[in-house]
Amino acid sequence: MPAGKEGTMEMKNLSRRNLLKLAGAGMMGATAAGFLAGCGPVPSESKSVEASAEGASGHDYSGLEVQQSEAYAVVAGGGAAGLMAAYKLAKEGKKPLVIEKGASCASSNFAKLSGPAACDTTVQAASGITLATKLNVYNQLTTWAKGSVNTKLISNLLDYSSEAVQDLLDMGLTFYTYVDYTGDPKYANDIKWAPLHNFTQEGEERIAPVVAAIEDLGGSFIYNCEATEVIMEGGKVAGIRAIEGGKVLHEISTPAVFLATGGFGGSEEMVKDLFKGIPVCNMGTPNNTGDGIRMAHEVGAVSEEFAGLVGNEICGSNVKHGNAMYDENWNLNNENLAFAIYGGLVLDKTGERFMNEELLAVDPLVYSGQAGLAQGKYYVLVDGEYYDACTEEGVYSYLGEPDWDFGREMFYPVLSAAPGQFEAAVSEGWAAKGDTIAEVAEVFGLDHLEETVAAYNALCQAGKDTQFGKDPMFLTPIKEGKGYYLFEYNAAYWTTLGGVRTNDHLIALTGDNEPIEGLYIGGVNMGSAFCRPYYDIKGAACGLSIASGVMAATEMISYIEG
């Protein structure tokens, strides 16, 4: 939509904050939403597995009814990458089968996220955006990653970026850019924002047209079906096993499998292992338990040596409060979580500063997660005047309405409910209030807090942060007179990043860097396409994921048909 006045007003009714609040609603209820009926392959044989039956990797399938079938290609996971792969295959007349762990594809993160980053699209052209070319997006991504990704793979993925967006448009979905939303042309000239395409639909309204398009073209789905292992013969993919509803074992013969099962954030074991015991909160779907990564490892694939996340840009989090951060009306259920991303005084467990806090405020998708991963726990101190201002007028107003994008579009601009929710935070163990700095420091054992505040206030008075370089608009001194509030936070994520190493054709690689024929990896499982910290282009995870679906389908067709 062009950024005309009428279009801008329409977009104002679709604020980024409200879309994410709706997304939160979908996140909490999606696993129970079985709005789509499953359509599986026609079984060629049905029988009962003996009690001792095991798969090649020790999976126990005893007591399950077996249904055997064939498919041109199987897509494991009905999220961003999986649905795009299925659509591309179906569009080419190949009749794919999608195995989805949830009751519907609306249980995936794809139903809830803001939208994809992409390059050279008709949507951008209509908004007057010329900056988001393939070369510019490629340079931004690979420069940010500093050699830690497969750069040829990134280039190949971006070749399919425009096609992926066009496919979504063809399926009936619509987008708006930040130029449309704000009416401000500056977003067309910022490489962090210009590639972003915000969906105007969410939840089932977003997913239903995509699924319908795939089914209309001959694709099929099996829901409540968890992929368990890839079947190999002669060093090549020969099929896949999956369990439907805990009762039926599907053994599907196929020469190509696309593993796009999402991240590992729903697996407590993998999160603990890969994040080395650091406490983190999962705001994404609980269905993403690293299934694709595990299945790939079982047949000899290896993972890249990092684990990352797409951070929570709405607020802070604390494992003592739990993963559920919204009440029944999808409002933040404790607004005292929000101080984590306001750019105030942020501290480590000794009570000392450890970063430029401005980064948490201007790019929380990247840095809110990194602060938690780096420190495990981090703390925010605010004085009583600051706290009252945030609860009465909002932080953006209190700071004088500076040039702060996330501040203008704050998810919860005025924390009016925070005072009434503060005691709950205290009882859960992640907040304290006192008349002196020493009093609140003692609660969490921040031994150096008093001296840190003295040094920080001197920087604020001078108007220049010579320690970490924070922008003066966030240099607010810690004032005396109205008490002090201290909060403890952990990292939270919408999805984890990282996983299987692939070549530039999305084929899984062994430890000897040899391709596993017929095994393709997509979405946030692509260890070779993501990095830590997460990219600073908004929507990069979704954008690379949808591109991976189109690319993987193209590669599978080429592989199968020679």
Image: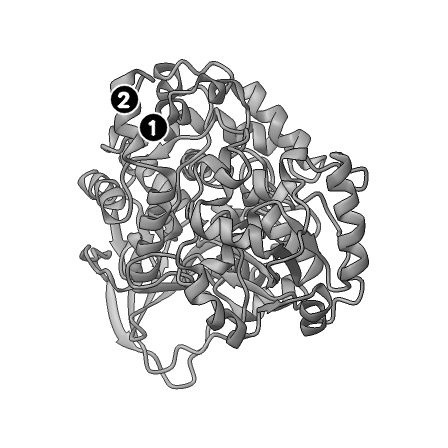
Residue 74 visible from this viewpoint: yes
The amino acid beneath tag 2 is Gly
Tag 1 and tag 2, C-beta contact below 8 Å? yes
- Give coordinates of residue 396: x percent, y percent: 50, 39
Earlier-in-chain disc, 1 versus 2: 2
How packed mark 2 is, by other alpha carbons closer than 10 Å (few <14, some 14-19, many 20 or more), is: some
Position of residue 483 in the picture relative to residue 165 (left or right):
right
Which residue sits at x=37%, y=50%? 74
Amino acid tagged 1: Tyr
Answer few, some or many: residues within 10 Å of disc 1's Cα (few below 14, many 20 plus, some between 14 and 19). Answer: many
**194 shown above or below 255:** above
The number of numbered badges drawn on the structure is: 2
Q: Is residue 225 left or right of residue 318?
A: left
Q: Which residue is at the front of the view, 88 or 109? A: 109
Q: Residue at x 42, y 48 (%)?
A: 414
Question: From the image, which quarter does the C terminus lie in?
Answer: top left
The residue singled out by tag 1 in the image is 176
Mark 2, secondary structure of its residue: helix
Q: Which residue is mark 2?
A: 7
Q: Secondary structure at mark 1?
A: strand
Between 191 and 292, the residue placed more toward the observer is 191
